[in-house]
Amino acid sequence: MLSQYSDFLFKSVFSLCTIVMLCAASLPIFQRRDNTGRLSMCSKLCYAIGGAPYQITGSALGFFLQIYLLDVAQLDPLHASIILFVGRAWDAVTDPTVGFLVSRSRWTRCGRMMPWILISTPFAVLTYFLIWYVPPVEQGKVLWYLVFYCLFQSLQTCFHVPYSALTMFISMDQKERDSATAYRMTVEVLGTVVGTAIQGQIVGGAIAPCLPGDLDVLDNGNSTLLGSDFNITHISLDETKQAYLIASAVICTMYVLCAAVLFLGVREQEANFSTFSQPTEPMSFFEGMRMVMGYGPYVKLVMGFLFTSLAFMLLEGNFALFITYTLGFRNDFQNILLVIMLSGTLSIPFWQWFLIRFGKKTAVYIGITWAVPFMILIVCIESSLIVAYVVSVAAGVSVAAAFLLPWSMLPDVVDDFKVKNPDSSGHEAIFYSFYVFFTKFASGISLGISTLSLDFAGYVTRGCSQPDAVNLTLKVLVSPAPVVLIFLGLFIFKTYPIDEERRQGNRKLLQEMRESDQDSETESTELGSAV
């Protein structure tokens, strides 16, 4: 079995290294911009690859950390819920803090965002690997996972917030930013496929053994399996722990390689930075928070996607347990998760075409609600593997929309703010970081509440089956609760004021502002030369 893991590891790393080397080799050949000022395909691709680490690690943690803490690290559900909630809440708090610090960063030879990405990468990789290591002590397990989970989330924030804000610095053209965002979302959804595939296929070959409940209670009150069954279980659990470490090593390698492609293949546009993004005066953290939270279109966009993101996070965090225990497909859950991500990856180009053809608000209504009937179907019919795969394909289509649309619409809000506040600039990172703050805080709430709910329902760690109360709780967490949250988010989003007409108007106004600034700079240069 270990030879299979090693073979999968070698093939995965070799394939990714080949792709990265081809991209790196192409950098001197393709210009980052063509003669018309448009971004080259190579630049967009390198920018998009930079988003993969966040999604690769996020999908692995989102789908597998809960079941890992419960069935491999063997923590009780209460402690697991504390780790998941505190870790995500801490992660949420660090986002606006890092966004504030990034907005006050000075321009360097590498840009303003790139130093953050470059310095945080090695430390993030180390802490991620240690999350998937089971320490040999029982007393300090909870503290171990809490510390390294929080550290990793903080370091990843130092990568992801500058990367998200980088969208505003690779081009000033809305179409180019939307195109680069589509590239990014395609690669990010592909990153979730890669993360789910690596974690699922490696770990799926060494699933943590379940306890059938036939236990012999010893005189001291401790329970153990009789005879040789205990040794078999013990060996198999060690193999599962090793499989998680191998999977994390592959993901860490990919993290570093993708960060290298981003650093080598994308350059922040210093001209754009100096023209539009230099802050007019220093702004305190609380002033920045009041600024973004006082801007109506931003608040409505963030609150709308907050509820829809919470819905999909509930589904993501509990779907592996739902498939394993409620549906009874213990040996198929990693393949079902992979189908969701593959469906999402293939759907990204369709949603990019759809939002261009019919508008972004229409894409939100159609894309987010697409999965609702299938969420209801999966809990209403008798357990069926075929139906599970059909629902997975449909859910992937909505997941693609949920990935693409927020990041495609945030630049529109920033542009709208620039039009309304032409004298206030340099706050892109604050807008992006507060959005990430709310989504991560929602993720922490969803993971904490769902794991705590399982504890109250009587979840049996490493059990081959669960009580009826646990199965009912899992059904609620993957269907009724997400459906309600989706409709709440869409109701709020109905008040979002930036439609296609307003977006195109902002685009024209910003173009006029850029041309006016360029004319002013030209006149100043000519006047200086004359003097």
Image (cartoon, rainbow, N blue to C red):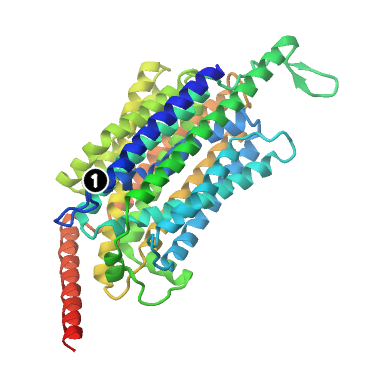
Residue 217 pos. (x, y %): 78, 18
Residue under the point 44% across and 53% down: 117
**Circle 1 SS class:** loop
Residue at x-position 72% and y-position 33%: 136
Q: Which of the two residues, 240 or 224, is positioned nearer the viewer here?
A: 240
Outermost residue, top side: 228
Q: Residue furthest right?
A: 219
Asked whether the viewer can see residue 480, the reply is yes
Q: Is residue 29 above or below residue 114?
A: above
Residue 402 in sight from this viewpoint: no
Query: In the displayed structure, would residue 336 be above or below residue 96?
Result: above
Q: Quadrant of residue 392?
A: top left
- Look at the picture and state if 172 lies above or below 133: below
Q: Position of residue 299 (x, y in %)?
A: 36, 60
Q: Position of residue 182 (x, y in %)?
A: 26, 44
Quarter of the picture holding the N terminus: top right
Q: Nearer the viewer, residue 156 or 23?
A: 23
Q: Which three-letter amino acid code belongs to the residue tagged 1?
A: Ile
Does residue 478 appear left or right of residue 181 in this picture? right
Question: Between residues 231 and 364, which one lies in front from this camera angle?
Answer: 231
Left/right placement of residue 327 relative to residue 188 reads: right
Residue under the image location 30 percent in, 59 percent down: 168
